[in-house]
């Protein structure tokens, strides 16, 4: 070993020792903060502020997304010293929903995998989990209707959001494409990879299943089968990534909502989600949204869904920039309330980083 290489390695070892000391110092301070709080340990707005500051101050060469990932895991480990959070998500283990939960909360959490989105909501409503992570829309496939339907009647609030790039991979126990007779995946994932499948596995039977993780589980026991799923499913079920990133749309992203019995305090860069109804009269929707334009409040989402129990009536799901406690947003909400048949604030929460 050269003297130069030895010197560099000794330098890294010294920095690692200092990092270890500082991480434990941080953990001690976090414990003291937890004792003062004496209640809710996880604060979405505080963690968002810390991550934004660190990414802004980052001098490199580490990329901002690496900084965010590292510090989310540090905060997760520190938080776990005070409260072991239980996170409900659409299971089984290995789904994109679990990946979204890890991206938002880190890995020092308890997993509560659920068979359906309904069960995800119920897990928090009944106290079996502290937070829920539920998919709400995909950039290529659109809204997740069941999540929108459930949130209208639920007491849960949106306290965060996660934007997860969806990279679909062809997974197999071993080998290449030769001999693949069946491809398992969720229906949405099969739809997101149609072009690739038509070109590369046109004869293989495409079998939709309840989740990508279930697809990986099935493929792990069938040598002639493959699955379309994410990296976490490959790790969970011992599969090789035969072909990575086979999605037809390279920028495919799914947005997830983080749900709890509370929303978040202002973080400085927030969103507020609403569901509203309009009277069934000409121009009602335009009149309903006019206060946003008048106040200069940006609308980032507008989605309509049929109202249950009433033919030809609709619910409008709206996301706006700003927190419900911001003076401008609060005044807009008051004005919309006077013009709508119903307005429900689903929650205010920190805007997610891409």
Image (cartoon, helix red, strand yellow):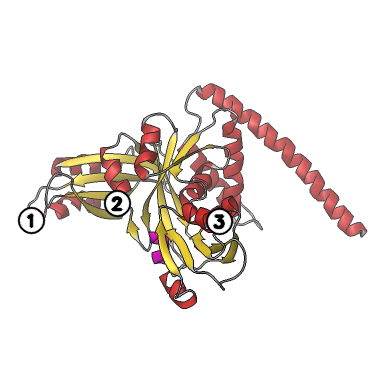
Q: Is residue 197 left or right of residue 339?
A: right
Q: Main secondary structure of the magenta part?
A: helix
Q: Are marks 2 and 1 in contact (CB under 8 Å)?
A: no
Q: Residue at x 50, y 22 (%)?
A: 38
Which residue is label 2 attached to? 145
Which residue is label 3 attached to? 221
Q: CA distance from mark 3 to mark 1?
A: 58 Å
Mark linked to residue 282: 1
Dot 3 falls on a residue whose secondary structure is: loop
Mark 3: few/some/many CA within 10 Å (<14, 14-19, 20+): few
- Residue at the bottom extreme? 199
Q: Earlier in the sequence, mark 3 or mark 2?
A: 2
Dot 1 falls on a residue whose secondary structure is: loop
Q: Are marks 3 and 1 in contact (CB under 8 Å)?
A: no
User: Which of the pair 76/36 is nearer the observer?
Assistant: 76
Mark 1: few/some/many CA within 10 Å (<14, 14-19, 20+): few
Q: Residue at x 92, y 57 (%)?
A: 3
Q: Is residue 129 magenta?
A: no
Q: Which residues are drawn in magenta?
A: 187-193
Q: Is residue 323 left or right of residue 201?
A: left
Q: CA distance from mark 3 to mark 2?
A: 32 Å
Q: CA distance from mark 2 to mark 1?
A: 26 Å
Quadrant in which the N terminus appears = bottom right
């Amino acid at each position: 070993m050269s003297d130069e290489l030895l010197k560099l390695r000794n330098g890294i070892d010294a920095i690692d020792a200092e990092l270890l000391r500082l991480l434990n110092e941080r953990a001690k301070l976090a414990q003291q903060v937890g004792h003062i709080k004496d209640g809710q340990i996880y604060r979405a707005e505080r963690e968002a502020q810390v991550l934004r500051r660190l990414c802004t101050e980052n001098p490199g060469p580490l990329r901002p997304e690496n900084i965010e990932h590292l510090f989310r895991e540090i905060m997760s480990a520190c938080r776990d010293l005070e409260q072991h959070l239980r996170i409900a998500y659409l299971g089984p283990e290995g789904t994109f929903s679990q990946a979204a939960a890890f991206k938002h909360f880190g890995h020092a959490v308890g997993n509560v995998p659920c068979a359906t989105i309904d069960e995800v909501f119920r897990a928090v409503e009944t106290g079996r989990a502290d937070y829920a992570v539920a998919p709400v829309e995909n950039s290529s496939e659109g809204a997740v209707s069941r999540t929108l339907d459930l949130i209208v009647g639920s007491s849960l609030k949106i306290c965060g959001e996660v934007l997860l790039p969806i990279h679909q991979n062809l997974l197999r126990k071993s080998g290449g494409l030769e001999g693949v007779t069946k491809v398992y995946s969720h229906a949405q994932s099969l739809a997101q990879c149609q072009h690739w499948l038509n070109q590369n596995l046109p004869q293989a039977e495409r079998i939709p299943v309840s989740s990508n993780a279930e697809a990986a589980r099935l493929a792990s026991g069938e040598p002639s089968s493959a699955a379309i799923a994410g990296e976490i499913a490959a790790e969970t079920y011992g599969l090789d990534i035969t072909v990575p990133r086979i999605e037809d749309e390279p920028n495919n992203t799914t947005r997830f909502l983080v749900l709890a019995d509370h929303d978040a305090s202002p973080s400085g860069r927030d969103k507020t989600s609403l569901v509203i109804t309009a009277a069934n009269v000409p121009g009602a929707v335009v009149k309903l949204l006019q206060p946003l334009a008048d106040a200069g409040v940006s609308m980032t989402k507008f989605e309509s869904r049929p109202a249950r129990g009433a033919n030809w009536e609709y619910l409008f799901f709206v996301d706006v920039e700003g927190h419900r406690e911001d003076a401008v947003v609060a005044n807009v909400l008051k004005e919309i309330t006077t013009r709508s048949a119903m307005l429900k604030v689903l929650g205010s929460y920190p805007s997610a980083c891409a």
